[in-house]
Image: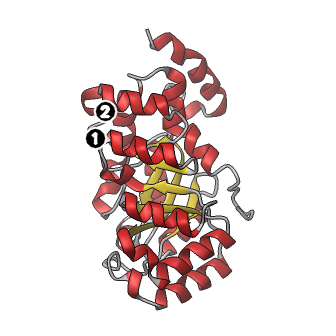
């Protein structure tokens, strides 16, 4: 019953990008390209993987930021850059108490343009520490989306610091659907990625509780692979195919929204080479 609905979208896509005519485009909102990834997988090859996966765009961050900049230089049409507050792997729990992170963020923000800051890991009352607080101020000043790998408590504290913030909740907090719904109901500027989760689409079917969640919030969800280790780059193509399989179990407009349109809207002010 859903197949015929997909035809007009496929036809539009055919006009836009003949290479992936039959595929639903995907905006992968959770890609990392850290130093150990680009040492093994040079930017040209990395971009080839993203194109092979049929990605329309990818939100990319990297520890050290250099990987992100290399990818942007290689494919400005494809890469939406996010600034991570980590310089090397292993800073994901120490950054909140490391004052030098602020100088790193300020220096990077003075040199390059970004659409987001993150993905950062931040839990509970740590959101009140000076370093995360300053990061939130910088995000506000530069109009950056906050990509937060956080519990609900930290998300609330981020919104208290900047009620106008736009937050992309990484992995939907690994929360159960009813808890995700509660936070989305409360905050209209909260979006949620589905990275590194599978219970919403195992075996190409969307379970009832997830279907209800996506239906209540059709414009808030987006997909993501989460290439948190270099090896996961080789999973990007398979992840895009897997996403298309479960998205096909949803009505076509909803599938299209989650596949790319919601992310495209969230980052609509981002244009390569222009201030976000
Ligand atoms: Zn991640």
Residue under the point 63% across and 77% down: 109
Neighbours of disc 2 within 10 Å: few (<14), some (14-19), many (20+)? some
Mark 2 highlights which residue?
201
From the top left corner, tell me how far across and down residue 235 is, in percent: 31, 49
Ligand 1 is within 8 Å of the C-beta of the residue at disc 1: no
Above or below: residue 58 compared with residue 97 = above
Mark 1 highlights which residue?
198
Position of the C terminus by quadrant: bottom right
Which is more toward the observer, 240 or 73?
Answer: 240
Above or below: residue 30 compared with residue 177 = below
From the top left corner, tell me how far across and down residue 149 is, in percent: 39, 62
Query: Based on the displayed image, in which of its 4 quarters is residue 30 positioned?
Result: bottom left
From the top left corner, tell me how far across and down residue 21 is, in percent: 54, 27
Callouts 2 and 1 close, C-beta under 8 Å: yes
Which is more toward the observer, 75 or 213?
Answer: 213
Position of the N terminus by quadrant: top left
Colour mapping used in the image: secondary structure
Horizontal relation, residue 268 to residue 104: left or right: right
Which is more toward the observer, 88 or 178?
Answer: 178
Query: Based on the displayed image, in which of its 4 quarters is residue 126 positioned?
Result: bottom left
Residue under the point 68% across and 56% down: 270
Residue under the point 62% across and 66% down: 114
From the top left corner, tell me how far across and down residue 19 is, in percent: 55, 34
Residue 205 is at least partly visible in this image:
no
């Amino acid at each position: 019953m859903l197949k015929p609905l997909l035809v007009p979208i496929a036809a539009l896509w055919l006009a836009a990008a003949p290479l992936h005519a039959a595929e639903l485009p995907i905006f992968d909102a959770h890609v990392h390209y850290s130093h150990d990834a680009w040492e093994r997988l040079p930017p040209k090859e990395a971009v080839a993987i993203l194109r092979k996966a049929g990605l329309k765009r990818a939100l990319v961050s990297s520890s050290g930021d250099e990987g992100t900049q290399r990818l942007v230089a290689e494919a400005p049409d494809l890469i939406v850059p996010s600034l991570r507050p980590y310089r090397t792997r292993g800073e994901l729990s120490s950054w909140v108490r490391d004052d030098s992170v602020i100088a790193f963020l300020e220096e990077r923000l003075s040199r390059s343009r970004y659409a987001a800051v993150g993905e950062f890991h931040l839990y509970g009352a740590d959101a009140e520490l000076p370093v995360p607080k300053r990061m939130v101020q910088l995000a506000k000043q530069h109009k950056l989306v906050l990509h937060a790998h956080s519990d609900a408590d930290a998300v609330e504290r981020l919104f208290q610091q900047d009620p106008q913030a736009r937050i992309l909740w990484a992995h939907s907090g690994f929360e159960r659907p009813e808890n995700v719904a509660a936070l989305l109901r409360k905050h209209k500027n909260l979006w949620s990625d589905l990275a590194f989760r599978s219970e919403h689409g195992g075996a190409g079917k969307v379970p009832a509780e997830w279907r209800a969640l996506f239906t209540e919030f059709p414009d808030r969800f987006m997909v993501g692979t989460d290439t948190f280790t270099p090896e996961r780059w080789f999973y990007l193509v398979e992840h895009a195919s897997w996403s298309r399989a479960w998205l096909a179990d949803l009505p076509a407009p909803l599938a299209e929204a989650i596949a790319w349109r919601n992310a495209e809207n969230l980052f609509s002010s981002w244009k390569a080479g222009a201030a976000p």
